[in-house]
Image (cartoon, rainbow, N blue to C red):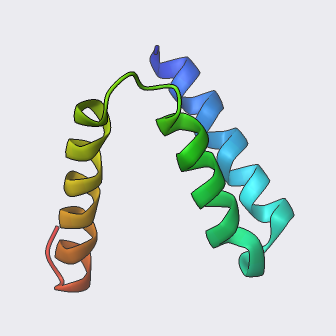
Amino acid sequence: MTDQDLDRSYSALCESLAIVGEEKAQLFLSMVCLSLMARCERAEDVLPLIVNVQAQCAAEAGGGA
């Protein structure tokens, strides 16, 4: 994915989150994640991403970068 593609995709995600609203944001993001995971061939392609994001969230919660 090019930087421009990534920017377009991120912008579309942000716009969609604004449209569905805070009450539906968790459901929306879960559905997007499941749709993207379904495009992967193996769990080994997905599981490291989940671990990485979990670690980033834990670092944020702990005040880390």
In this picture, residue 32 sits left or right of residue 59 = right
Residue 57 rendering spot, x and y as whole percentages: 28, 70
> Residue lying farthest bottom?
62
Q: Does 11 appear above or below 61?
A: above
The answer to which of 41 and 23 lies nearer the viewer is 41
In this picture, residue 57 sits left or right of residue 24 = left
The answer to which of 38 and 14 lies nearer the viewer is 38
Residue 47 rendering spot, x and y as whole percentages: 25, 45
State the count of labels.
0
> Residue lying farthest right?
19
Q: Quadrant of residue 59?
A: bottom left
In this picture, residue 11 sits left or right of residue 46 = right
Q: Residue at x 52, y 27 (%)?
A: 6
Quadrant location of the C terminus in the rendered image: bottom left
Q: Residue at x 85, y 61 (%)?
A: 19
> Residue lying farthest front?
42
Q: Does 64 appear above or below 18?
A: below
Q: Does 54 appear above or below 46?
A: below
Residue 4 rendering spot, x and y as whole percentages: 55, 19
The answer to which of 36 and 14 lies nearer the viewer is 36
Q: Quadrant of residue 36?
A: top right
Q: Does 44 appear above or below 60?
A: above
Residue 22 rendering spot, x and y as whole percentages: 72, 78
In this picture, residue 55 sits left or right of residue 6 = left
The answer to which of 62 and 31 lies nearer the viewer is 31
